[in-house]
Image (cartoon, grey):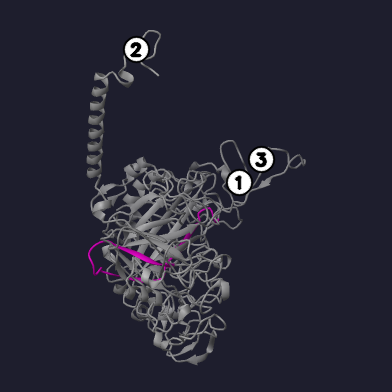
């Protein structure tokens, strides 16, 4: 497999003026948080390079007392999971932008050792007083949280650098034991990509065929990109793999879906996805960061190394659909569009505005594994031809099926796209181009003239793709003070910017029931709308759940003890906690529950289960009747303070069949629904069986023709009768126009 320096294969997730944050809301994205009780995260570099505002993200959810392990939700294979997010600077058919949202997942088979970072001490601290110096017993029925041993109290320190001198002195087996198995208290450090992934990045040549504008990359391995020119480390993520899609070396991440602003991109995306395409790899025996392993077959062979092939993941190509239409400078709801055409969808009665979302079917290859979801968001402009690599002819030429995978045919050239030939020459005095680095373009390299876009020149045919340029808009004599230059806020360090968020870990199991399963859960963070922003306040997700009578809901609630302290109207119950229940009510305009004799969706036992959420009345203070001094009291079950962080504890107990009469059923959270401050209300719409609702295309066509035939036959019969009786338009005309007997 030949992998040249291609922009046609290696697509930079371009972005111009890209302060365009991306936040996952369902499942909750970490934005590199863990257990800090703050409005702002501690460490922007803990697991990955998000590029997002430090105020975003959701705290870790689960039982804070568990030692050295997660307390994750479990989703079932084949179940429908609604993924929700907000992205700040538009996507979909918005004419202001090109965009892609890449949704991926990875599990502990391709990312061994994957974890959030868990405390491993034998001791717990006094959680309600946020006092890590006061030890308390590590058991339920108190607000305690386990201590960390080597990490900081919030579990947000970086995992040690595998290339540090201290770690390099360890044996390969000891390094594996620490990073993958979490020994020596390394379980306390969050880790997605592991040390083997990072070392491969460290010792592999970067792709020098890429467009870097005027950015000077400070090294030659895959840690250095236009967005990360200094090679900074974030977790153990490889910056080049993060910044480019599709990537030209095998990645541990599998593609779930790519949502775009132009569906013509999809041919390239779906043929180059590592789900279906393998890539070549040079097997270098020894390398250093100054002598990285080459990525081209020709260079690999010239050095006497073996060039091998890494197979595709062997699963279906990802969905490739239009992203919902949303506007610039806005973290909020979007217009629903037809995913195949991008056209607006007319809302149905009872619909409501929604965050951008995608309904994902949990794939079978995740069964029995611990996994994470990853989202990356790209925005691009038309200031240069950033999306030329998507040209269908380019795809057709370069990516025909070949022996052992796919072959990039040399006679096709490198395709179209912005590449290293457009890079600006370095303008610093210490530039050394002796190593043949194509980033060192000058006016004499390959007889290519120095491009005007590398300077402050604004011409009829080019714009200055140059760091923070000042342009002479009217071509006036600035020396004679007849005009001045306008400064443009274009930073080429950010014109290749990618934004990212990831979930916490979850587990996947085979479904214990047959039939469609739809996940219903909780999104949101403690605080009022301003305090929570850019995260969101509490809500059920989806807040309008449609199910047919032969389908199942999988209801699971996941709570955190690691919010910033918010009391009174900014959050109910204990000041650090997230909890919810579900209680039936008559209508969404209401704020009181139905009397138990009027419940229609749940029977009495199930209604108690979801209202009390596992709290034992024998353990509760049953005399509490008001909020005076009791909001933070652990035994205040009325505020759900004794609810487990994950409910139900057995995921199978969250399965509820929608075998109810067709109609709408309404419910709310008795704790979080605080009228005039926040609403946490939702609806379940039972819509009959799938057999009633989901007619095949053939059935729809057949019925349509039947209706047409019936209407046509009826119309013909009526016409014959009217003609015989000389009625309507069959009346005989009379002189002067009109019809006989016309009124």
Q: Is residue 77 left or right of residue 120?
A: left
Taking the magenta stretch, the answer to whether it contains residue 510 is yes
Q: CA distance from mark 1 to mark 3?
A: 14 Å
99 w.r.t. 219: above or below: above
Identified at 40% across, 55% down, the residue is 245
Residue 400 visible? yes
Quadrant housing the C terminus: top left
Q: Secondary structure at mark 1?
A: loop
Q: Secondary structure at mark 3?
A: loop
**Front in this rendered view, residue 658 or 155:** 658
Circle 2 is placed at which residue position? 733
346 w.r.t. 217: above or below: above
Circle 1 is placed at which residue position? 455
Callouts 1 and 2 close, C-beta under 8 Å: no
Q: Secondary structure at mark 2?
A: loop
Q: Position of residue 469 (x, y in %)?
A: 63, 49
- Mark 2, residues whose alpha carbon is within 10 Å: few (<14), some, or many (≥20)? few
Which numbered mark, 1 or 3, is in the foreground of this view? 3
Q: CA distance from mark 3 to mark 2?
A: 73 Å
Q: Position of residue 113 (x, y in %)?
A: 35, 75
Circle 3 is placed at which residue position? 473
Callouts 3 and 2 close, C-beta under 8 Å: no
Which numbered mark, 1 or 2, is in the foreground of this view? 2
Query: What is the magenta range?
Result: 493-522
**Front in this rendered view, residue 338 or 108:** 338
Q: Position of residue 313 (x, y in %)?
A: 28, 60
Tell me which numbered mark, 1 or 3, is placed earlier along the sequence: 1
- Mark 1, residues whose alpha carbon is within 10 Å: few (<14), some, or many (≥20)? some
Residue 290 visible? no
**Front in this rendered view, residue 204 or 82:** 82
Taking the magenta stretch, the answer to whether it contains residue 60 is no
Q: Is residue 486 left or right of residue 538?
A: right
């Amino acid at each position: 497999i030949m992998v040249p320096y291609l922009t046609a294969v290696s697509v930079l997730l371009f972005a111009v003026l890209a302060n365009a944050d991306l936040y996952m809301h369902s499942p909750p994205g970490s934005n590199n948080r863990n257990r800090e009780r703050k409005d702002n995260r501690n460490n922007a570099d803990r697991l990955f390079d998000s590029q997002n505002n430090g105020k975003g993200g959701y705290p870790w959810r689960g039982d804070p007392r568990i030692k050295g392990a997660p307390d994750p939700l479990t989703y079932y294979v084949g179940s429908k999971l609604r993924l929700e997010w907000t992205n700040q600077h538009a996507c979909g058919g918005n004419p202001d932008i090109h965009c892609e949202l890449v949704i991926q997942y990875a599990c502990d088979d391709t990312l061994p050792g994957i974890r959030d970072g868990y405390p491993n001490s034998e001791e717990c601290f006094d959680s309600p007083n946020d006092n890590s110096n006061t030890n308390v017993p590590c058991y339920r029925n108190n607000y305690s949280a386990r201590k960390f041993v080597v990490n900081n109290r919030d579990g947000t320190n970086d995992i040690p650098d595998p290339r540090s001198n201290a770690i390099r002195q360890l044996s390969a087996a000891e390094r594996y034991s620490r990073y993958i198995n979490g020994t020596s208290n390394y379980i306390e450090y969050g880790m997605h990509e592991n040390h083997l992934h990072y070392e491969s990045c460290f010792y592999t040549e970067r792709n020098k065929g890429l467009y870097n504008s005027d950015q000077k990359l400070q090294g030659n391995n895959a840690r250095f990109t236009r967005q990360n020119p200094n090679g900074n480390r974030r977790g153990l993520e490889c910056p080049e793999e993060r910044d480019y899609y599709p990537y030209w070396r095998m990645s541990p991440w599998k593609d779930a879906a790519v949502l775009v602003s132009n569906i013509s991109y999809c041919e390239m995306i779906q043929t180059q996805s590592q789900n279906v395409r393998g890539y070549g790899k040079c097997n270098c025996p020894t390398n250093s960061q100054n002598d990285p392993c080459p990525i081209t077959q020709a260079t690999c062979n010239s050095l006497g190394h073996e060039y091998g092939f890494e197979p595709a993941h062997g699963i279906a190509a990802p969905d490739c659909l239009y992203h919902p239409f949303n506007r610039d400078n806005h973290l909020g709801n979007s217009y629903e569009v037809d995913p195949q055409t991008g056209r607006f969808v007319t809302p149905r009665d009872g619909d409501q505005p929604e965050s951008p979302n995608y309904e994902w079917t949990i794939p079978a290859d995740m069964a029995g594994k611990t996994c994470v979801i990853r989202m990356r968001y790209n925005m691009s402009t038309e200031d240069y031809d950033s999306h030329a690599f998507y040209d269908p002819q380019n795809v057709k030429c370069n990516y025909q099926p070949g022996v052992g995978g796919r072959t990039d045919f040399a006679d096709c050239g490198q395709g179209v796209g912005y590449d290293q030939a457009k890079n600006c020459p370095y303008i610093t005095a210490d530039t050394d181009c002796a190593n043949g680095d194509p980033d060192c373009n000058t006016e004499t390299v390959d007889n290519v003239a120095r491009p005007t876009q590398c300077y402050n020149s604004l011409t009829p045919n080019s714009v200055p793709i140059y760091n923070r340029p000042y342009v002479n808009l009217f071509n006036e004599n600035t020396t004679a003070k007849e005009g001045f230059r306008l400064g443009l806020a274009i930073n080429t360090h950010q014109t290749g910017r990618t934004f990212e968020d990831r979930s916490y870990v979850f587990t996947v199991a085979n479904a214990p029931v047959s039939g469609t399963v739809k996940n219903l859960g909780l999104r949101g963070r403690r605080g009022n709308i301003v305090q929570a922003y850019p995260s969101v306040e509490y809500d059920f997700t989806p807040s309008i759940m449609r199910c047919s009578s032969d389908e199942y809901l999988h209801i699971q609630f996941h709570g955190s003890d690691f919010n910033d302290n918010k009391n009174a109207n900014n959050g109910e119950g204990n000041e650090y906690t997230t909890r919810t229940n579900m209680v039936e009510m008559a209508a969404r305009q209401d704020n009181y529950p139905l009397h138990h004799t009027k419940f229609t969706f749940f029977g009495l036992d199930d209604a108690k289960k979801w209202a009390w959420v596992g709290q034992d009345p024998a353990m509760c203070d049953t005399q509490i009747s008001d909020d005076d001094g009791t909001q933070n009291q652990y035994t205040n079950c009325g505020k759900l303070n004794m609810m487990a962080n994950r409910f139900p504890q057995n995921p199978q107990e969250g399965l509820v069949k929608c075998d109810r009469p067709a109609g709408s059923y309404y419910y709310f959270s008795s704790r979080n629904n605080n009228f005039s401050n926040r609403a946490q209300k939702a609806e379940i719409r039972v819509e009959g069986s799938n057999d009633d609702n989901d007619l095949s295309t053939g059935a729809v066509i057949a019925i349509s023709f039947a209706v047409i035939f019936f209407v046509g036959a009826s119309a013909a019969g009526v016409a014959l009768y009217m003609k015989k009786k000389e009625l309507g338009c069959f009346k005989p005309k009379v002189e002067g126009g009109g019809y006989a007997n016309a009124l």
